Amino acid sequence: MSMQQSYANILTAVGEDLDRPGLKDTPMRAAKAFSYLTSGYSKTLEEVTNNAVFPSDNDEMVLVKNIEFYSLCEHHLLPFHGRVHIAYLPSGNVLGLSKFARITEMFARRLQIQEQLTKQIADAVAEVTNARGVAVVIDSAHMCMMMRGVSKQESTTRTVSFVGDFKTDKEARREFLSAVPEAH
């Protein structure tokens, strides 16, 4: 069964009339949107980084802040969205700055939980850069908490993942966390 037919079945199951003008092309549009929202499955780390690792003698923290993202919760298929902050301690190589957004996007465009997304980004940056340490913070709002269930409109969730020196060096971790803005 095609994704488009599956959406038609869902709409019919909730009592909608697929011949109603507003719904005529909805199964096709919904299937196309869902394919886009889960397009991260068709990408690899090698593709999204595209050999953009460059030699560098910089060994101080590199921090990319406020990378916005949208993802779908694997439990309810509802959106969650927010910002990612990524830092790493180079060890002879640096990664092109746009690649942090591409790595984030690749993992965010999969059915996710925020905790796993945070770890996947950190592990990917560590793998590509061979950095001494990687730190990732994600602040996000979850529609599964806002639109259903407890209906808490102002709640946000912060997750962190530390790899290498950021896990063991309290001063490096403190420097990173002090540079990352608080969620609003």
Image (cartoon, rainbow, N blue to C red):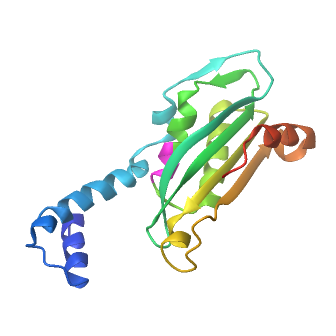
Which region of the structure is painted magenta? 105-109
Q: Give the residue drawn at x 20%, y 65%.
A: 27
Q: Indicate yes or no whether the magenta region holds residue 106.
A: yes
Q: Position of residue 86 (x, y in %)?
A: 67, 39
Position of 105 relative to 154 (above/below): above
Q: Position of residue 155 (x, y in %)?
A: 63, 65
Which of 5 and 93 lies nearest the eye of the viewer?
5
Q: Tally the numbered discs.
A: 0
Q: Position of residue 19 (x, y in %)?
A: 7, 73
- Does residue 56 appear left or right of residue 9 in this picture? right
Which of 87 and 52 lies nearest the eye of the viewer?
87
Quadrant of the snapshot with the N terminus: bottom left
Magenta part, dominant SS: helix
- Does residue 21 appear left or right of residue 137 in this picture? left
Q: Quadrant of residue 77?
A: bottom left
Q: Quadrant of residue 93?
A: top right
Q: Indicate yes or no whether the magenta region holds residue 129.
A: no
Which of 33 and 161 lies nearest the eye of the viewer?
33
Q: Position of residue 106 (x, y in %)?
A: 48, 45
Q: Give the residue drawn at x 57%, y 63%.
A: 113
Position of 145 relative to 135 (above/below): below
Position of 65 relative to 59 (above/below): below
- Does residue 72 appear left or right of residue 3 in this picture? right
Q: Give the residue drawn at x 43%, y 49%.
A: 40
Position of 8 relative to 157 (above/below): below
Q: Give the residue drawn at x 80%, y 22%.
A: 59
